[in-house]
């Protein structure tokens, strides 16, 4: 699609938005139901496309992509009328006779740029928010998952008119073209480096945006954690989708008292999940590209491999791997891993673990395994992170009742549930003033105006 065709599409969407059709409750509900029906009818194809692109099992495809979306749509349909209603606010003493309220207003035409690691969920979840808030939308799926991208293009094209919701395929050059268009809102999910490019492009046109990025999310295991259950939940969080999860535990901070026992349990759980030969497991996810595979494989020479470490370049597959004797100056600790490699660092005092985290950019997620309330309180109070879970991993992303997003380098803004609606809505403030009476002291012609103002607004 060339620039002229792209610009024409955006103008068609803006024209449709100005018509007001997409702003009614009935229209929004109808479109969310149409989206759900489209997903249901394409469910088998979605599962197959995820298998082709990432070798995701049907269980993983449903639990981490499709099922979450069904939950989001159902919750949004249930709550949308309430979210759309104007909210009354209190009236200031100086504004007696007036009424104040806040009206959620759609931004207009939104651009959604989706990533490759959860190419269905992370494309459709923000689209639900855009539709619920009354926007039109252009969706740009990732070119690194071509089968799912093509399916999304077909499914969306057969479900919605392009002047309402459209899908545009292509690589980085297409994203760059889209970022030059006069969108009213941009929602981007991806890496920190690309996020900077998106933010710079948005700044040139003063377009508001949400950035869902990433970073090195720590997992702390304190000495009092139930180790077998802890190991199972860490293995689940780290090796789901072969570690290609923005909120996967990126590295492990484990108390010196329990490190050896935790490692034994982690090895057992990896075998339980993926067998003794994960590379031959038909349900174990593959790495998305050769470039990404080579980057990850280079990390395997660092520290000591205590479990896993084997690779299959032909399948773009890397075993779930545990790396011990890791130091902060190693390359594996300099960037987000985004793969099935878990570095392990030991600490003796909880404050040491906190300091190690706080000396680095704020992470998207944090996981703490401890049964001590005091330890939980200290970590939550002293460490800044986007969101997280105590005594589990990943699960905070799966509830529509919690906003999901980053802080600092890990992202700007949040979504899911009501937060998705608010993400794509401008909160318009309105004050309705009475005409039944008027206060003369507010005007410059009042002789005693200043006197009254000083009484009303005294410190």
Image (tube, rainbow, N blue to C red):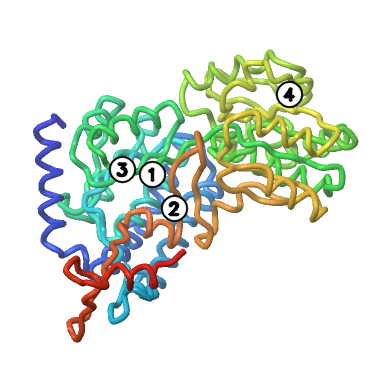
Circle 1: element type: strand
Q: Mark 2 points at which residue?
A: 415
In the image, residue 113 above or below residue 387? above
- Viewer-closest of 67 and 425: 425
Mark 3 or mark 1: which comes first in sequence?
A: 3
- Disc 3, disc 1: CB below 8 Å? yes
In the image, residue 362 above or below residue 81? above
Gap between marks 2 and 3 measured at Cα: 13 Å
Mark 1 or mark 2: which comes first in sequence?
A: 1
What residue is drawn where x is 59% and y is 43%? Answer: 385
Q: Name the residue under label 3.
A: 186
Q: Mark 1 points at which residue?
A: 210
Mark 4 or mark 3: which comes first in sequence?
A: 3
Mark 2 or mark 3: which comes first in sequence?
A: 3
- Image coordinates for residue 309, horizontal then vertical, percent: 69, 21
Among the 4 quarters of the image, the one containing residue 313: top right
Among the 4 quarters of the image, the one containing residue 447: bottom left
Gap between marks 4 and 1 measured at Cα: 34 Å
In the current view of this chain or complex, which residue is farthest to the bottom? 436
Gap between marks 3 and 1 measured at Cα: 6 Å
- Disc 1, disc 2: CB below 8 Å? yes
């Amino acid at each position: 699609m060339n620039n002229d065709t792209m610009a024409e599409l955006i103008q068609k969407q803006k024209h449709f938005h100005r018509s007001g059709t997409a702003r009614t409750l009935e229209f929004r509900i109808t479109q969310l139901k149409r989206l759900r029906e489209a997903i249901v009818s394409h469910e088998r194809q979605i599962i197959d496309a995820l298998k082709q692109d990432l070798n995701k099992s049907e269980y993983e495809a449903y639990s981490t992509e499709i099922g979450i979306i069904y939950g989001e749509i159902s919750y949004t349909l249930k709550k949308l009328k309430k979210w759309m209603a104007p909210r009354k606010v209190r009236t200031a003493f100086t504004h007696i006779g007036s009424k104040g309220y806040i009206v959620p207003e759609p931004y207009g035409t939104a651009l959604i740029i989706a990533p490759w690691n959860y190419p269905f969920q992370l494309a459709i979840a923000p689209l639900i928010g855009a539709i619920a808030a009354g926007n039109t939308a252009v969706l740009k799926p990732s070119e690194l998952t071509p089968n799912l991208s093509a399916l999304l293009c077909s499914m969306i094209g057969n479900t919605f008119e392009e002047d309402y919701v459209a899908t545009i395929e292509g690589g980085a050059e297409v994203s760059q073209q889209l970022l030059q268009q006069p969108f009213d809102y941009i929602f981007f999910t991806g890496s920190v480096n690309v996020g900077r490019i998106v933010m710079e492009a948005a700044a040139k046109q003063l377009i508001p945006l949400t950035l869902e990025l990433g970073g090195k999310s720590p997992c702390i295991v304190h000495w009092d954690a139930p180790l077998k259950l802890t190991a199972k939940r860490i293995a689940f969080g780290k090796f789901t989708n072969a570690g290609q999860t923005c909120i996967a535990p990126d590295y492990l901070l484990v108390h010196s008292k329990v490190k050896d026992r935790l490692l034994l349990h982690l090895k057992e759980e990896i075998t339980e999940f993926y067998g003794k030969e994960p590379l031959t497991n038909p349900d174990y996810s593959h790495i998305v590209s050769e470039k990404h595979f080579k980057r990850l494989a280079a990390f395997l020479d660092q520290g000591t491999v205590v479990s896993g470490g084997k690779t299959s370049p032909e399948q773009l597959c890397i075993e779930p791997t545990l790396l011990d004797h890791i130091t902060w100056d190693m390359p594996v600790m300099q960037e987000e891993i985004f793969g099935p490699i878990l570095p392990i660092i030991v600490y003796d005092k909880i404050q040491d673990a906190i300091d190690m985290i706080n000396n680095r950019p704020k992470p998207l997620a944090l996981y703490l395994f401890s049964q001590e309330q005091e330890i939980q309180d200290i970590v939550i109070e002293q460490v800044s992170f986007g969101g997280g879970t105590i005594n589990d991993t990943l699960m905070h992303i799966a509830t529509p009742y919690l906003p999901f997003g980053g802080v600092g380098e890990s992202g700007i803004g949040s979504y899911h549930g009501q937060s998705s609606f608010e993400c794509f809505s401008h909160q318009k403030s309105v004050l309705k003033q009475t005409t039944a009476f008027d206060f003369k002291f507010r005007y410059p012609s009042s002789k005693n105006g200043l006197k009254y103002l000083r009484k009303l607004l005294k410190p």
